[in-house]
Amino acid sequence: MTDRFNHSNYLIRKKVLKVFGDAFHIYDAQGGLAFYVKQKAFKLKEDIRIYSSEDMTEEILVIKARSRIDFSATYDVYDPQRNESVGSLRRKGMKSILKDEWTILDTQEVEVGLITEDNMLLAIIRRFLSNLVPQSFRGTMGQYNVFTFNQRFNPFIQKIELDFSMDHNRLLDRRLGIAASVLLSAIEGKQQ
């Protein structure tokens, strides 16, 4: 695995006022560009590509929805450089009405972890009163926290701090963690 996946902390930046599609920059703790994400507009079936840089010549990860617009969609994560599946992320549709929840699946479709939104009250305020309340998520595998995802308030640029530092034993494949953060930024961000 390349060095870009070996950092404990990342900063995700997304321009809020982009007209067509979305683009994300993911920086490592030293401020270097670790990943560039391009999400095309007007897609009925999500297909998100993660690149090493803005020139988009080196594809690092691919995230594809299994079906068209689906409330409980499953997104497969693939590593084209190693020609292998990394795992999947499944949105828990009905549970996510009030508080977002995702399941982390390994390559055999076994549930190995969970991603949950911070708390019910803030989630309800975000959905029904104001999308200005930043989102926070926690990723767990069994009883262990493996990452946190904390959005900072900024009306023009979405900034998200992604922290894997509590995952001392590297229970979560960082490729799946990066893909999860991209989905949380892209999919959940649209629903606010």
Image (cartoon, helix red, strand yellow):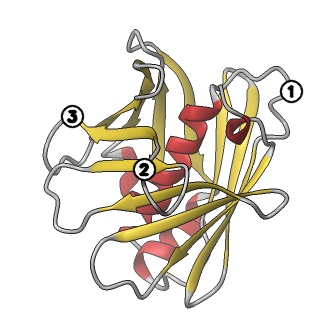
Where is residue 94 drawn, in percent x and y? 31, 46
Q: Earlier in the sequence, mark 2 or mark 1?
A: 2
Q: How far apart are marks 2 and 1 (CA)?
A: 32 Å
Between circles 2 and 1, the one closer to the viewer is 2
Residue 121: give its label. none
Where is residue 126 drawn, in percent x and y? 50, 75
- Give the structural element (helix, strand or loop) at label 3: loop
Q: Which of marks 2 and 3 is nearer the N terminus?
A: 2
What is the count of numbered marks? 3
Q: Is residue 91 visible?
A: no
Q: Earlier in the sequence, mark 1 or mark 3?
A: 3
Kind of residue at disc 3: Arg
Residue picked out by circle 3: 66
Residue 57: give its label. 2
Residue 28, quarter of the rendered image: bottom right
Residue 168: give its label. 1
Q: Residue at x 66, y 81 (%)?
A: 153
Q: Do the residues labelled 1 and 3 touch (CB within 8 Å)?
A: no
Where is residue 53 drawn, in percent x and y? 54, 57
Q: Which of 10 and 96 is in front in this view?
A: 10
- Give the structural element (helix, strand or loop) at label 2: loop
Q: How far apart are marks 1 and 3 (CA)?
A: 32 Å
Quarter in which the N terminus is drawn: top right
Q: Is residue 130 visible?
A: yes
Kind of residue at disc 2: Thr
Query: Does residue 43 sit above or below 134 in this rendering?
Result: above
Q: Determine the residue located farthest toward the top in the rendered image.
A: 108
